Image (cartoon, rainbow, N blue to C red):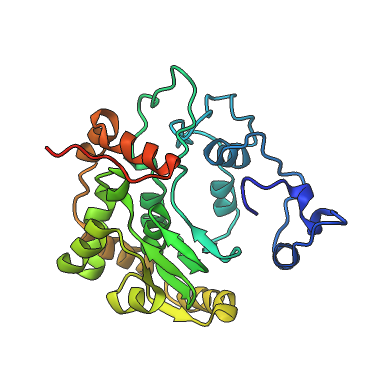
């Protein structure tokens, strides 16, 4: 369910006017949370609310700078402890993940909480997950969304999917991409994709090694489920060790430089302002 869409605007939840056949079919196949209501219109706080069952302001989760902490309630952790062992992301409309919210929504006086840092980024959580994680990339996949797909154990993409690494177009020296992308595609191609921010299609993504499988769009969900069944045939403890050894190939991630730039450089602010104002960014040459 999209996190910024009211459930009562979906046919599966009883709306007699709005037609949502794809969401209705998804609700019929899986688990439907009839009483899971979010209390905030912005993506980060609404997700925190859904994961914890708290109102967004209870623990200060007001903006994208106030992330869910490791000590706080987490629905996904409860599901894992209850025996669920495979995660599958994607397969909703024509967008897998367009990246983070660049709206800059914040309240005066907001600041990043002490003690929280890169260890709470979703990319590392996916990378280090002991459970297999499968991505079903059904459409637009860029920025943080592409990192999510790359960190999954298997990324199955629709032949309609498109990809892009636009961080430098927004003034962000993304440390995760700088470490992860060359391990997948090599230094030369990583430079191409990072420095240009160009779009590329599923066929090129497969050829470069960004993702592992491409299937016809209508077969995406079945292919992702089949990939999950294939992974689950392997020995769980040995699989966990192999995942850890593979992840070591990513090397060090220079989050110190990235977070310094986000805090002190004018470029991320100009990049995001330009995005919101729908204009080219005005960079100052060093």
**Given the current orientation, which residue lies at the most extreme top position?**
109
Left or right position of 175 against 200: left
Q: Examine the rendered structure and indicate whether residue 20 appears above or below residue 54.
A: below
Left or right position of 191 against 208: left
Q: Is residue 97 visible?
A: yes
Res 263 quadrant in image:
top left
Q: Nearer the viewer, residue 113 or 245?
A: 113
Residue located at (48% from left, 57% from top): 97
Q: Is residue 130 visible?
A: no
Residue located at (27% from left, 40% from top): 282
Left or right position of 148 against 263: right
Question: How far from the left and from the top, in percent, is residue 37?
Answer: 71, 41
Residue located at (30% from left, 58% from top): 197
Q: Examine the rendered structure and indicate whether residue 61 appears above or below residue 242.
A: above
Which image quarter is the N terminus in? bottom right
Question: How far from the left and from the top, in percent, is residue 52?
Answer: 60, 37
Which image quarter is the C terminus in? top left
Question: How far from the left and from the top, in percent, is residue 264?
Answer: 24, 28
Q: Nearer the viewer, residue 103 or 232?
A: 103
């Amino acid at each position: 369910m999209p996190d910024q869409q009211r459930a009562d605007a979906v046919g599966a939840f009883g709306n007699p006017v709005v037609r949502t056949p794809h969401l209705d079919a998804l609700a019929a196949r899986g688990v439907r949370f009839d009483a899971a209501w979010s209390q905030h219109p912005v993506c980060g706080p609404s997700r925190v609310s859904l994961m914890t069952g708290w109102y967004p302001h209870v623990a200060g989760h007001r903006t994208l700078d106030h992330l869910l902490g490791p000590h706080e309630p987490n629905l996904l952790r409860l599901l894992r402890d209850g025996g669920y062992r495979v995660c599958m992301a994607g397969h909703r409309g024509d967008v897998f993940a367009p990246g983070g919210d660049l709206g800059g929504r914040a309240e005066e006086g907001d600041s990043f909480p002490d003690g929280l840092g890169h260890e709470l980024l979703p990319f590392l959580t996916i990378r280090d997950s002991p459970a297999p994680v499968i991505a079903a990339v059904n459409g637009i996949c860029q920025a943080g969304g592409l990192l999510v797909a790359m960190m999954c154990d298997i990324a199955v993409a629709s032949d309609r999917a498109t990809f892009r690494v636009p961080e430098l177009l927004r003034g962000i020296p993304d440390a995760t991409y700088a470490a992860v992308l060359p391990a997948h595609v090599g230094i030369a191609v990583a430079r191409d994709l990072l420095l240009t921010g160009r779009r590329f299609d599923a066929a090129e993504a497969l050829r470069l090694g960004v993702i592992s499988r491409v299937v016809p769009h209508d077969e995406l969900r079945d292919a992702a489920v089949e990939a999950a069944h294939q992974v689950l045939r392997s020995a769980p403890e040995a699989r966990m060790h192999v995942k850890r050894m593979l992840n070591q190939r990513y090397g060090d991630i220079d989050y110190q430089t990235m977070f310094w730039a986000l805090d002190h450089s004018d470029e991320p602010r100009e990049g995001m302002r330009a995005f919101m104002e729908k204009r080219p960014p005005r960079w100052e040459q060093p």
